Protein backbone atom coordinates (compact mmCIF):
# COMPACT_ATOMS: atom_id res chain seq x y z
CA UNK A 1 0.00 0.00 0.00
CA UNK A 2 2.80 2.41 0.93
CA UNK A 3 4.57 1.82 -2.39
CA UNK A 4 1.31 2.48 -4.25
CA UNK A 5 0.87 5.77 -2.34
CA UNK A 6 4.42 6.81 -3.23
CA UNK A 7 3.77 5.98 -6.86
CA UNK A 8 0.55 8.02 -6.79
CA UNK A 9 2.37 11.02 -5.33
CA UNK A 10 5.06 10.77 -8.02
CA UNK A 11 2.38 10.73 -10.70
CA UNK A 12 0.75 13.83 -9.25
CA UNK A 13 4.07 15.64 -9.03
CA UNK A 14 4.87 14.67 -12.62
CA UNK A 15 1.47 15.90 -13.83
CA UNK A 16 1.94 19.21 -11.97
CA UNK A 17 5.43 19.58 -13.44
CA UNK A 18 4.23 19.04 -17.00
CA UNK A 19 1.28 21.38 -16.46
CA UNK A 20 3.66 24.07 -15.20
CA UNK A 21 5.94 23.55 -18.20
CA UNK A 22 2.98 23.88 -20.53
CA UNK A 23 1.92 27.14 -18.87
CA UNK A 24 5.44 28.54 -19.10
CA UNK A 25 5.63 27.51 -22.75
CA UNK A 26 2.33 29.24 -23.55
CA UNK A 27 3.42 32.34 -21.65
CA UNK A 28 6.70 32.34 -23.55
CA UNK A 29 4.86 32.11 -26.88
CA UNK A 30 2.57 34.98 -25.91
CA UNK A 31 5.51 37.07 -24.77
CA UNK A 32 7.27 36.35 -28.04
CA UNK A 33 4.30 37.83 -29.90
CA UNK A 34 5.07 41.29 -28.51
CA UNK A 35 7.32 43.59 -30.54
CA UNK A 36 10.92 44.02 -29.33
CA UNK A 37 11.28 46.44 -26.39
CA UNK A 38 7.52 46.40 -25.81
CA UNK A 39 6.77 48.01 -22.37
CA UNK A 40 6.38 45.45 -19.61
CA UNK A 41 2.87 45.14 -18.22
CA UNK A 42 1.13 46.30 -21.40
CA UNK A 43 -0.85 43.74 -23.42
CA UNK A 44 0.71 42.76 -26.72
CA UNK A 45 -0.85 44.34 -29.83
CA UNK A 46 -3.40 42.17 -31.59
CA UNK A 47 -4.06 41.54 -35.25
CA UNK A 48 -7.18 43.27 -36.68
CA UNK A 49 -9.01 39.94 -37.12
CA UNK A 50 -8.60 39.18 -33.40
CA UNK A 51 -10.57 42.26 -32.34
CA UNK A 52 -13.08 42.57 -35.20
CA UNK A 53 -16.00 41.05 -33.29
CA UNK A 54 -15.40 43.07 -30.11
CA UNK A 55 -15.12 46.30 -32.13
CA UNK A 56 -18.39 45.48 -33.90
CA UNK A 57 -20.15 44.88 -30.58
CA UNK A 58 -18.80 48.19 -29.24
CA UNK A 59 -19.96 49.95 -32.43
CA UNK A 60 -23.52 48.66 -32.09
CA UNK A 61 -23.76 49.54 -28.41
CA UNK A 62 -22.25 52.98 -28.96
CA UNK A 63 -24.62 53.88 -31.79
CA UNK A 64 -27.62 52.64 -29.83
CA UNK A 65 -26.55 54.73 -26.86
CA UNK A 66 -25.79 57.87 -28.88
CA UNK A 67 -29.05 57.61 -30.85
CA UNK A 68 -31.21 57.00 -27.79
CA UNK A 69 -34.55 58.73 -28.24
CA UNK A 70 -34.10 59.02 -32.02
CA UNK A 71 -36.66 57.07 -34.06
CA UNK A 72 -35.06 57.58 -37.48
CA UNK A 73 -32.69 54.58 -37.48
CA UNK A 74 -33.16 50.85 -38.00
CA UNK A 75 -30.29 48.53 -37.04
CA UNK A 76 -29.45 45.27 -38.85
CA UNK A 77 -26.46 42.96 -38.43
CA UNK A 78 -24.92 40.37 -40.73
CA UNK A 79 -21.70 38.34 -40.96
CA UNK A 80 -19.56 37.59 -44.00
CA UNK A 81 -17.71 34.25 -43.73
CA UNK A 82 -14.02 33.90 -44.70
CA UNK A 83 -15.01 31.78 -47.70
CA UNK A 84 -17.15 34.71 -48.92
CA UNK A 85 -14.96 37.74 -48.23
CA UNK A 86 -11.72 35.98 -49.25
CA UNK A 87 -9.45 38.25 -47.15
CA UNK A 88 -6.38 36.25 -46.13
CA UNK A 89 -5.60 38.59 -43.22
CA UNK A 90 -9.07 37.91 -41.73
CA UNK A 91 -9.44 34.14 -41.07
CA UNK A 92 -12.76 34.84 -39.30
CA UNK A 93 -16.22 36.07 -40.21
CA UNK A 94 -16.43 39.86 -40.54
CA UNK A 95 -19.54 41.53 -39.05
CA UNK A 96 -21.50 44.16 -40.98
CA UNK A 97 -23.63 46.80 -39.28
CA UNK A 98 -26.35 48.25 -41.50
CA UNK A 99 -28.07 51.37 -40.17
CA UNK A 100 -31.07 52.54 -42.20
CA UNK A 101 -32.08 56.19 -42.01
CA UNK A 102 -35.52 57.28 -43.21
CA UNK A 103 -35.41 59.62 -46.21
CA UNK A 104 -38.20 61.84 -44.89
CA UNK A 105 -36.01 62.71 -41.89
CA UNK A 106 -32.95 63.56 -43.98
CA UNK A 107 -34.47 65.12 -47.13
CA UNK A 108 -37.56 66.76 -48.54
CA UNK A 109 -39.14 65.05 -51.54
CA UNK A 110 -36.91 65.23 -54.63
CA UNK A 111 -34.23 67.19 -52.75
CA UNK A 112 -30.61 66.41 -51.85
CA UNK A 113 -30.36 69.24 -49.28
CA UNK A 114 -30.11 67.82 -45.75
CA UNK A 115 -32.89 69.01 -43.48
CA UNK A 116 -31.90 70.78 -40.25
CA UNK A 117 -33.74 68.09 -38.27
CA UNK A 118 -31.13 65.57 -39.47
CA UNK A 119 -28.10 67.44 -38.09
CA UNK A 120 -28.35 65.60 -34.77
CA UNK A 121 -28.51 62.25 -36.57
CA UNK A 122 -25.34 63.10 -38.49
CA UNK A 123 -23.74 64.05 -35.17
CA UNK A 124 -24.57 60.57 -33.86
CA UNK A 125 -22.87 58.83 -36.80
CA UNK A 126 -19.88 61.20 -36.74
CA UNK A 127 -19.38 60.92 -32.98
CA UNK A 128 -19.42 57.14 -33.21
CA UNK A 129 -16.90 57.15 -36.07
CA UNK A 130 -14.55 59.37 -34.08
CA UNK A 131 -14.36 56.64 -31.41
CA UNK A 132 -13.57 53.87 -33.89
CA UNK A 133 -10.18 52.18 -34.29
CA UNK A 134 -8.25 53.12 -37.44
CA UNK A 135 -9.23 51.74 -40.82
CA UNK A 136 -12.96 51.23 -40.24
CA UNK A 137 -14.96 51.63 -43.46
CA UNK A 138 -18.34 53.32 -43.91
CA UNK A 139 -20.40 53.20 -47.10
CA UNK A 140 -23.18 55.81 -47.37
CA UNK A 141 -25.75 54.40 -49.82
CA UNK A 142 -28.59 56.36 -51.41
CA UNK A 143 -31.83 54.53 -52.30
CA UNK A 144 -35.10 55.74 -53.87
CA UNK A 145 -38.53 54.41 -54.78
CA UNK A 146 -39.36 53.66 -58.42
CA UNK A 147 -41.20 56.90 -59.25
CA UNK A 148 -39.37 58.60 -62.10
CA UNK A 149 -36.83 57.11 -64.50
CA UNK A 150 -34.06 54.77 -63.40
CA UNK A 151 -31.44 57.33 -64.45
CA UNK A 152 -33.11 60.11 -62.45
CA UNK A 153 -33.40 57.92 -59.36
CA UNK A 154 -29.80 56.76 -59.62
CA UNK A 155 -28.65 60.40 -59.83
CA UNK A 156 -30.90 61.46 -56.92
CA UNK A 157 -29.61 58.59 -54.76
CA UNK A 158 -26.01 59.58 -55.52
CA UNK A 159 -26.61 63.27 -54.75
CA UNK A 160 -28.17 62.33 -51.43
CA UNK A 161 -25.40 59.87 -50.56
CA UNK A 162 -22.87 62.58 -51.41
CA UNK A 163 -24.64 65.17 -49.21
CA UNK A 164 -24.60 62.82 -46.21
CA UNK A 165 -21.04 61.55 -46.74
CA UNK A 166 -19.78 65.12 -47.21
CA UNK A 167 -21.56 66.30 -44.05
CA UNK A 168 -19.86 63.50 -42.10
CA UNK A 169 -16.29 64.15 -43.28
CA UNK A 170 -16.83 67.88 -42.68
CA UNK A 171 -17.41 66.94 -39.03
CA UNK A 172 -13.84 65.68 -38.73
CA UNK A 173 -13.75 61.97 -39.59
CA UNK A 174 -10.10 61.05 -40.03
CA UNK A 175 -9.65 57.43 -38.98
CA UNK A 176 -12.53 56.09 -41.12
CA UNK A 177 -12.75 55.66 -44.88
CA UNK A 178 -16.09 57.09 -46.07
CA UNK A 179 -17.56 56.15 -49.48
CA UNK A 180 -20.63 57.36 -51.34
CA UNK A 181 -22.69 55.05 -53.56
CA UNK A 182 -26.13 55.04 -55.15
CA UNK A 183 -28.41 52.15 -56.03
CA UNK A 184 -31.34 54.34 -57.00
CA UNK A 185 -34.50 52.22 -57.16
CA UNK A 186 -32.69 48.90 -57.72
CA UNK A 187 -32.64 47.62 -54.10
CA UNK A 188 -36.11 48.05 -52.58
CA UNK A 189 -36.73 46.77 -49.05
CA UNK A 190 -40.51 47.06 -49.41
CA UNK A 191 -43.17 47.16 -52.09
CA UNK A 192 -43.34 50.15 -54.43
CA UNK A 193 -47.07 49.62 -54.86
CA UNK A 194 -48.07 51.47 -51.66
CA UNK A 195 -47.31 54.89 -50.17
CA UNK A 196 -45.86 53.31 -47.02
CA UNK A 197 -43.70 50.93 -49.03
CA UNK A 198 -42.30 53.72 -51.18
CA UNK A 199 -41.49 55.70 -48.03
CA UNK A 200 -39.39 52.81 -46.69
CA UNK A 201 -37.57 52.44 -50.00
CA UNK A 202 -36.57 56.13 -49.97
CA UNK A 203 -33.71 55.86 -47.52
CA UNK A 204 -30.06 56.45 -46.69
CA UNK A 205 -28.09 53.44 -45.45
CA UNK A 206 -24.90 53.51 -43.37
CA UNK A 207 -22.85 50.32 -43.76
CA UNK A 208 -20.03 49.84 -41.25
CA UNK A 209 -17.34 47.17 -41.29
CA UNK A 210 -13.69 46.51 -40.55
CA UNK A 211 -13.01 45.95 -44.26
CA UNK A 212 -14.62 47.34 -47.41
CA UNK A 213 -14.56 43.95 -49.19
CA UNK A 214 -16.97 42.61 -46.58
CA UNK A 215 -19.39 45.47 -47.32
CA UNK A 216 -19.14 44.80 -51.05
CA UNK A 217 -19.92 41.12 -50.47
CA UNK A 218 -22.94 42.12 -48.37
CA UNK A 219 -24.20 44.42 -51.13
CA UNK A 220 -23.87 41.91 -53.95
CA UNK A 221 -26.05 39.51 -51.95
CA UNK A 222 -28.97 41.92 -52.04
CA UNK A 223 -31.80 41.20 -54.49
CA UNK A 224 -32.28 43.83 -57.21
CA UNK A 225 -35.28 44.75 -59.32
CA UNK A 226 -35.84 42.59 -62.39
CA UNK A 227 -34.78 43.91 -65.78
CA UNK A 228 -37.11 46.42 -67.45
CA UNK A 229 -36.95 49.00 -70.23
CA UNK A 230 -35.26 51.65 -68.07
CA UNK A 231 -32.51 49.22 -67.10
CA UNK A 232 -31.96 48.42 -70.77
CA UNK A 233 -31.61 52.12 -71.60
CA UNK A 234 -29.23 52.81 -68.70
CA UNK A 235 -27.06 49.69 -68.72
CA UNK A 236 -27.50 48.19 -72.17
CA UNK A 237 -27.96 44.45 -71.70
CA UNK A 238 -29.92 42.98 -68.79
CA UNK A 239 -28.09 39.69 -69.18
CA UNK A 240 -24.86 41.38 -68.16
CA UNK A 241 -23.93 42.25 -64.60
CA UNK A 242 -24.39 45.87 -63.54
CA UNK A 243 -21.24 47.58 -62.27
CA UNK A 244 -21.59 50.44 -59.78
CA UNK A 245 -18.73 52.47 -58.29
CA UNK A 246 -18.48 53.44 -54.63
CA UNK A 247 -16.33 56.58 -54.43
CA UNK A 248 -14.27 57.77 -51.48
CA UNK A 249 -15.17 61.16 -50.00
CA UNK A 250 -12.45 63.22 -48.30
CA UNK A 251 -11.31 66.71 -47.35
CA UNK A 252 -7.88 67.92 -48.36
CA UNK A 253 -5.39 68.70 -45.56
CA UNK A 254 -5.44 72.49 -45.97
CA UNK A 255 -9.10 72.58 -44.83
CA UNK A 256 -8.73 70.38 -41.75
CA UNK A 257 -8.08 73.28 -39.39
CA UNK A 258 -11.37 74.86 -40.46
CA UNK A 259 -13.10 71.52 -39.76
CA UNK A 260 -11.64 71.48 -36.24
CA UNK A 261 -12.63 75.09 -35.55
CA UNK A 262 -16.24 74.48 -36.63
CA UNK A 263 -16.42 71.32 -34.50
CA UNK A 264 -15.20 73.34 -31.49
CA UNK A 265 -17.78 76.05 -32.22
CA UNK A 266 -20.55 73.45 -32.36
CA UNK A 267 -19.39 71.95 -29.07
CA UNK A 268 -19.54 75.35 -27.39
CA UNK A 269 -23.10 75.89 -28.65
CA UNK A 270 -24.20 72.47 -27.42
CA UNK A 271 -22.74 73.17 -23.98
CA UNK A 272 -24.07 76.73 -23.64
CA UNK A 273 -27.08 76.42 -21.32
CA UNK A 274 -27.86 80.13 -21.64
CA UNK A 275 -29.04 79.74 -25.25
CA UNK A 276 -32.70 79.14 -25.97
CA UNK A 277 -33.63 76.32 -28.33
CA UNK A 278 -34.30 78.85 -31.09
CA UNK A 279 -30.96 80.58 -30.58
CA UNK A 280 -29.06 77.27 -30.51
CA UNK A 281 -30.82 76.14 -33.67
CA UNK A 282 -29.92 79.39 -35.43
CA UNK A 283 -26.27 79.05 -34.40
CA UNK A 284 -26.17 75.44 -35.57
CA UNK A 285 -27.57 76.41 -38.98
CA UNK A 286 -24.83 79.04 -39.30
CA UNK A 287 -22.17 76.42 -38.58
CA UNK A 288 -23.68 74.01 -41.10
CA UNK A 289 -23.70 76.75 -43.74
CA UNK A 290 -19.98 77.31 -43.13
CA UNK A 291 -19.31 73.57 -43.29
CA UNK A 292 -21.02 73.32 -46.65
CA UNK A 293 -18.51 75.80 -48.09
CA UNK A 294 -15.59 73.45 -47.30
CA UNK A 295 -14.63 71.78 -50.61
CA UNK A 296 -15.06 68.02 -50.88
CA UNK A 297 -12.41 65.97 -52.64
CA UNK A 298 -13.27 62.76 -54.53
CA UNK A 299 -9.94 60.98 -55.10
CA UNK A 300 -9.53 58.41 -57.83
CA UNK A 301 -10.22 55.64 -55.32
CA UNK A 302 -13.23 53.59 -56.36
CA UNK A 303 -14.64 50.26 -55.24
CA UNK A 304 -16.53 48.29 -57.90
CA UNK A 305 -19.79 46.61 -56.90
CA UNK A 306 -21.03 44.14 -59.51
CA UNK A 307 -24.72 43.26 -59.26
CA UNK A 308 -26.27 40.34 -61.14
CA UNK A 309 -29.77 41.15 -62.44
Image (cartoon, rainbow, N blue to C red):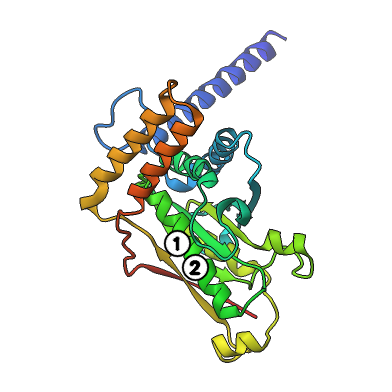
Q: Is residue 97 visible?
A: no
Q: Residue at x 55, y 73 (%)?
A: 154
Depth order, front residue of 201/91: 201
Residue 67, compared with residue 159, is above or below; it is above
Residue 302, how many percent across, how many down?
A: 40, 69
Residue 246, how many percent across, how many down?
A: 46, 67
Residue 6, compared with residue 294, is above or below; it is above
In what element is the residue under mark 2? Answer: helix
Q: Residue at x 43, y 29 (%)?
A: 270
Q: Is residue 196 visible?
A: yes
Q: Which residue is mark 1?
A: 162
Residue 301 sits in quarter: bottom left
Q: Which residue is mark 2?
A: 158
Residue 118, how many percent across, how many down?
A: 53, 46
Q: Residue furthest left?
A: 254
Checking the image for residue 99, the label placed there is none
Q: Are marks 2 and 1 in contact (CB under 8 Å)?
A: yes
Q: Residue at x 41, y 24 (%)?
A: 272
Q: Alpha-carbon neighbours of circle 2 within 10 Å: few (<14), some, or many (≥20)?
A: many
Q: Residue at x 70, y 80 (%)?
A: 226
Residue 83, compared with residue 258, is above or below; it is below
Q: Disc 2 versus disc 1: distance between alpha carbons?
A: 6 Å
Q: Residue furthest right?
A: 194
Depth order, front residue of 69/305: 69
Amino acid sequence: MESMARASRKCRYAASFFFLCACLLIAGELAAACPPNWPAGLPCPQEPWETVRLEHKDRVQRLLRLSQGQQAFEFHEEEIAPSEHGIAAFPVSIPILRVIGRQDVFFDSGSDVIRAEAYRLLDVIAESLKREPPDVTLFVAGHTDWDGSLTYNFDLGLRRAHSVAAALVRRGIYQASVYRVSFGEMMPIDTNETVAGKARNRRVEFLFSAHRKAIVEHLVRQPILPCDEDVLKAFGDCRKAISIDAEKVTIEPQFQQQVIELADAQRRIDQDKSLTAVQADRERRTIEAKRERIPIHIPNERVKIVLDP
